Image (cartoon, rainbow, N blue to C red):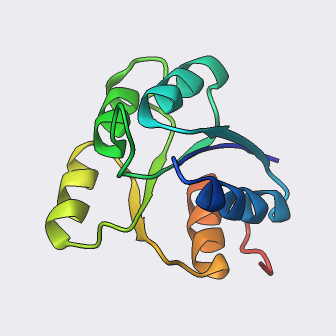
Amino acid sequence: MARILIVDDSPSQLMSIRRIVEKLGHDALTAEDGAAGVEAAKRELPDLILMDVVMPNLNGFQATRSITREATTKHIPVILVTTKDQDTDRVWGMRQGARAYITKPFSESELADIINQYLGTAPSAA
């Protein structure tokens, strides 16, 4: 069982992603903006981070850059989960250190597959 940090400012998205993460048998940690996400990543050292991009305070690109360049958190895979679907957004997100980029809306199986891929676990029947 992995510990997955979900960073999203939308309560409905947070709950939706949390439900999928817990259905896969993982523990879900949450943060409601990029700054809180960076602090939670440093404090909790999760196994994986699912990061929204459009958020107040610190956006997901900035938070991802901070996490992936910090010595204590740079090993944690960050997956951007966002409505920003332009190629330039995807390229910029990957340049900030994200390992993958998934756009909303996504299917439950799509999110489950990417989580399993980065945790190195077998695909689930989600």
Q: Residue furthest left?
A: 88
- Asked whether residue 58 is in view, the answer is yes
- Asked whether residue 120 is in view, the answer is no
Vertical side of 89 occupied by 95: above or below = above
Image quadrant in which you'd find residue 25: bottom right
Image quadrant in which you'd find residue 18: bottom right
Vertical side of 107 occupied by 71: above or below = above
Residue 2: x percent and y percent? 75, 45
Residue 10: x percent and y percent? 55, 54
Residue for point 35% across, 51% down: 54
Taking 14 as reference, is 39 left or right?
left
Taking 70 as reference, is 125 left or right?
right
Residue for point 37% across, 68% down: 83
Residue 59: x percent and y percent? 33, 41
Residue for point 37% across, 39% down: 56
The residue closer to the viewer here, 124 or 67, is 67
Vertical side of 23 occupied by 65: above or below = above
Residue for point 51% across, 32% down: 37
Residue 74: x percent and y percent? 42, 29
Vertical side of 10 occupied by 116: above or below = below
Taking 8 as reference, is 92 left or right?
left
